[in-house]
Image (tube, helix red, strand yellow):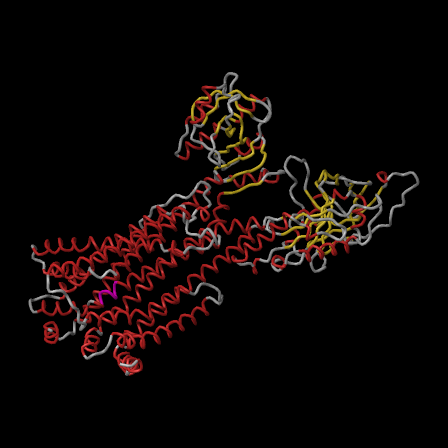
């Protein structure tokens, strides 16, 4: 037979047959098309939603990190050629310098930055004002567009003054200079200033300078980022604690008055910042690494920003660290999303395979008849393709159209949708071809029984090798993920083979369950045969025969595994963030910076504060004279910490032994590995400039942040031994009034002091777009996967309905009622449901337990010492509830459809 004849016999009448079959099964094909469109849409939508969340997280990280994520080029004014010579055109020089710096920015970075604003300020000094002593400083602001940053309310705008004539023999330092300034309305009220008042300026001056107030102003836009770090120029601010000042205020000079300021100050006493704001709207997660690299290059070598007079600005920004830190967090979220995406693609493909199986089972008699009449396997597959290709193509078109409406962003992975679509195209053809190949196909077998047994053993061996191969691949993937995580070490992207580890493990568990389930069902059938119930016997017998098909079991197992995995991941992240807040903040408020004992005592007396613990840490202190052993020295308010631990339900009674000093040695607790050192050497610990003898009174489980051994002493006892105060550098407050106490006592305004609240920390982490987006993705995935499990059960029940109806028709002649028929249908599928639920739940618990560190959850929880898996049973309940609902719906639908069956016709079909 020629090639042309072979092709003609294969494709002849294909469109006609396909059209007639499609018309006959139009309803089923429409449902299959809707299912395919939904699955392709989900497969395409998931990676784009992940990218959208990643971009939103990058923008949020930059926005929340302000002002540290602004890019600032910092420099000093040029040194005057002649000391005391007033520069001309200073404002124009600043604009020119800002333009030069902007031109020197790399193109990849400059496109994400705004036009620069320029601020020039001098260091603050204590100024004598009518209201008392104030903290003041002089400054000048240039907006990006050249507009006026303030509006003048009273008086006038500062102007330039005539040049001061230096008398013969008079030194520059003795010159009396003036500069006209303006103050904000609130500053004028707080300091008691009016136009015409004068304030003596102090600082790194080259000549005497007096600021003359000529007007008051209001900021045009007080929230404009150009005022970052200049809030005292916008309004009067509380003075730093302990300075005795009534307020802090800025004195603003205009463009014309700027030369009068610069001529009186040394160049080292004036700082000019050219500030570029980052544009979050243009930022994407993909470009974050490039931007961070460019910023790091400029920080290391700012020579491209060199000015015309050879001054080289220094770059001041944390944009690169912020973006790199975010990339680490994004890696953890990407790892989670990759596991879900691989699972959704797998479950979606298996669901389409079950839908194709249902279609082939409905047409089994037609396919068998075709084969009996001489149709080839290729021709049967070709006619199936003539249906599946247009149907899947239309479904993909609908999915892509909906995708364009839901997510306008075009970039994102297309392969998940392509994989699902390929299954939708090929599954009907492959299953139909496999069916007709098994029927009416001659197969020669040996007449000798021993030869037949040998061939059967070979088939069993091949199947066993395939199953063992799957088990080995799943085990290898698991070991690889535990060793190096889900991200490829070469590119930093997701290794999709490793991301499919839960799917591979589900497949391996399906193989094991498929081996265990038939013997269990046989035992159940024997037990049912000894009882009076007919439904149990028939159901177990049919379930035993149906257990040879692993696709429904694999679908349910993978879906349940990912439902449980998603639920456990969300629970782990939620609980981990609560634990991280306890570890990072250590209370309701944490104060970083020097806080003296008087302030700590005042905080303890504040209403609503139940505990205040001050701590001072020295790293790498020698323990034991000439021992060569280093430890971390922790000086803590031992009594307060012991009381706090008792209230928290985690008592540490050994801390109370540190309070009673007594003797010449300071009581101390040490890590267990330091006990031997204390026995062999004189137990002394180096502080700042001297050894302090200690009395080791026991061991402690405390460690420093890096897990190094520690020596713990009471802070007051150490201060008594040193003969000097030991101020706390970290203070932790517990109680509902902690935040209010810190604000009221002005501790946060002290120099070098920053505060961190537990509620604020938690809000920042929980409301982060990356964390909230991942939680939403997990929740949506749970619903989608549970829905797919229900669909898989329904398709399985419907696919076996015709064969089961024949059995039920025969049993109806023996008096089978409707309730027993429902129990028989449910009992046939129930072993599949239970096996899938047990195996899937086991995989859902085992995968996060074994891969907690590989999934990068610490980047999402913020825990400094690693993430612990949180056990929750709600995901299992969700999966079980979905499967039971699906089983009930499928059985009820089948019963209602079977209600109108003709018993006589059914019995005749059963006899065939």
Kindly tell me whether residue 876 is visible in this rendering: yes
User: Which one is nearer the viewer's eye here, 584 or 756?
Assistant: 584
User: Which one is nearer the viewer's eye here, 275 or 9?
Assistant: 9
Q: What's the magenta bit mostly, secondary-structure-wise?
A: helix
- Magenta segment boundaries in residue numbering: 793-798
Mark count: 0
Percent coordinates x, y for residue 519 in the rendering: 16, 53
Kindly tell me whether residue 19 is visible in this rendering: no
Left/right placement of residue 75 relative to residue 418 reads right
Left/right placement of residue 797 relative to residue 599 reads left
Left/right placement of residue 666 relative to residue 455 reads right
The answer to which image quadrant residue 687 occupies is: top right
The quarter of the picture where the C terminus appears is: bottom left
The quarter of the picture where the N terminus appears is: bottom left
Residue furthest to the right in view is 168
Percent coordinates x, y for residue 400 in the rendering: 42, 70
On screen, 855 above or below 624? below
The answer to which image quadrant residue 466 occupies is: bottom left
Left/right placement of residue 539 relative to residue 274 reads left
Asked if the stretch drawn in magenta spans residue 351, the answer is no
User: Which one is nearer the viewer's eye here, 11 or 397?
Assistant: 11
């Amino acid at each position: 037979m020629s090639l042309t004849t072979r092709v003609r016999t294969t494709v002849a009448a294909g469109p006609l047959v396909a059209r007639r079959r499609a018309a006959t099964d139009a309803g089923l094909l429409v449902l299959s098309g809707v299912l395919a469109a939904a699955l392709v849409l989900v497969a395409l939508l998931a990676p784009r939603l992940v990218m959208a969340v990643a971009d939103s997280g990058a923008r949020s990280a930059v926005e929340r990190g302000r002002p540290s994520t602004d890019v600032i080029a910092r420099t000093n004014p040029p040194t005057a050629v002649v000391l005391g010579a007033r520069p001309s055109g200073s404002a124009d020089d600043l604009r020119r310098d800002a333009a030069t710096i902007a031109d020197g920015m790399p193109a990849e970075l400059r496109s994400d930055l705004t036009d620069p604003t320029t601020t020039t300020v001098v260091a603050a000094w204590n100024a004598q004002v009518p209201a008392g002593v104030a903290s003041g400083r002089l400054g000048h602001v240039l907006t990006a567009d050249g507009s006026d940053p303030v509006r003048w309310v009273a008086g006038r705008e500062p102007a330039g003054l005539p040049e001061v004539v230096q008398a013969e023999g008079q030194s520059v330092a003795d010159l009396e200079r003036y500069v006209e300034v303006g103050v904000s309305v609130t500053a004028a009220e707080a300091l008691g200033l009016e136009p015409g008042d004068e304030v003596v300026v102090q600082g790194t001056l080259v000549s005497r300078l007096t600021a003359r107030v000529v007007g008051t102003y209001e900021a045009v836009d007080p929230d404009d980022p150009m005022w970052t770090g200049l809030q005292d120029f916008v309004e009067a601010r509380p003075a730093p604690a302990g300075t005795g000042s009534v307020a802090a205020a800025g004195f603003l000079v205009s463009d014309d008055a700027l030369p009068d300021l610069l001529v009186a100050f040394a160049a080292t006493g004036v700082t000019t910042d050219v500030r570029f704001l980052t544009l979050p709207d243009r930022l994407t997660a993909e470009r974050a690494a490039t931007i961070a690299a460019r910023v790091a290059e400029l920080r290391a070598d700012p020579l491209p920003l060199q000015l015309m007079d050879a001054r080289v600005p220094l770059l001041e920004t944390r944009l690169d660290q912020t973006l790199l830190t975010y990339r680490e967090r994004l890696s953890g979220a990407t790892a989670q999303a990759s596991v879900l995406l691989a699972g959704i693609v797998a479950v979606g493909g298996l669901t389409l395979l079950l839908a194709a199986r249902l279609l082939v089972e409905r047409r089994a008699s037609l396919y068998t008849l075709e084969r009996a009449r001489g149709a080839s396997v290729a021709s049967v597959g070709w006619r199936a393709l003539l249906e599946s290709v247009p149907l899947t193509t239309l479904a993909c078109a609908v999915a892509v159209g909906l995708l364009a409406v839901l997510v306008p962003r075009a970039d994102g992975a297309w392969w998940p949708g392509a994989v699902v679509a390929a299954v939708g195209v090929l599954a009907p053809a492959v299953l139909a071809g496999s069916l007709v190949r098994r029927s009416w196909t001659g197969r020669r077998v040996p007449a000798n029984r021993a030869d037949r047994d040998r061939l059967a053993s070979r088939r069993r061996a091949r199947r066993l090798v395939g199953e063992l191969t799957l088990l080995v691949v799943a085990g290898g993937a698991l070991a690889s993920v535990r060793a190096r995580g889900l991200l490829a070490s070469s590119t930093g992207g997701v290794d999709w083979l490793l991301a499919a580890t839960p799917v591979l493990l589900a497949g391996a568990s399906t193989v094991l369950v498929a081996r265990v389930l038939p013997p269990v069902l046989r035992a159940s059938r024997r037990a049912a045969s000894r009882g009076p119930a007919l439904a149990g016997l028939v159901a177990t017998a049919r379930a035993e025969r149906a257990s040879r098909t692993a696709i429904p079991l694999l679908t349910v197992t993978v879906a349940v595994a990912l439902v449980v995995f998603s639920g456990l991941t969300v629970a782990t992240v939620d609980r981990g963030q609560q634990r991280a807040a306890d570890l990072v903040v250590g209370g309701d408020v944490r104060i970083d910076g020097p806080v003296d004992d008087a302030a700590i005592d005042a905080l303890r007396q504040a209403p609503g504060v139940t505990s205040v613990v001050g701590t001072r840490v020295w790293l790498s202190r020698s323990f034991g004279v000439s021992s060569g052993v280093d430890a971390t020295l922790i000086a803590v308010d031992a009594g307060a910490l012991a009381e706090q631990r008792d209230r928290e339900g985690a008592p540490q009674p050994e801390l109370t032994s540190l309070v009673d000093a007594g003797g010449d040695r300071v009581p101390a607790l040490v890590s267990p590995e330091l006990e031997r050192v204390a026995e062999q050497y004189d137990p002394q610990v180096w502080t700042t400039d001297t050894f302090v003898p200690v009395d080791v009174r026991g061991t402690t489980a405390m460690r420093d942040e890096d897990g190094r051994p520690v020596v713990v002493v009471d802070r007051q006892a150490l201060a008594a031994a040193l003969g000097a105060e030991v101020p706390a550098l970290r203070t932790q407050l517990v109680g509902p009034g902690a935040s209010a106490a810190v604000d009221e006592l002005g501790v946060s305004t002290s120099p070098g002091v920053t505060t961190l609240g537990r509620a604020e920390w938690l809000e920042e982490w929980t409301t982060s777009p990356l964390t909230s987006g991942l939680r939403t993705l997990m929740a949506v995935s749970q619903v989608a996967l549970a829905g797919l499990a229900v669909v898989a059960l329904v398709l399985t029940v419907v696919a076996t309905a015709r064969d089961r109806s024949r059995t039920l028709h025969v049993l109806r002649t023996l008096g089978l009622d409707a309730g027993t028929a429902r129990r028989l249908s449910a009992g046939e599928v129930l072993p599949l449901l239970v096996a899938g639920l047990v195996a899937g739940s086991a995989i859902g618990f085992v995968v996060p337990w074994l891969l907690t560190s590989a999934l990068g959850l610490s980047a999402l929880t913020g825990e400094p010492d690693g993430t612990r898996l949180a056990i929750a049973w709600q995901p299992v309940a969700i999966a079980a509830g979905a499967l039971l609902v699906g089983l009930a719906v499928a059985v009820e639908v089948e019963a209602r459809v079977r209600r109108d069956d003709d018993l006589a016709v059914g019995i005749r079909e059963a006899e065939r």
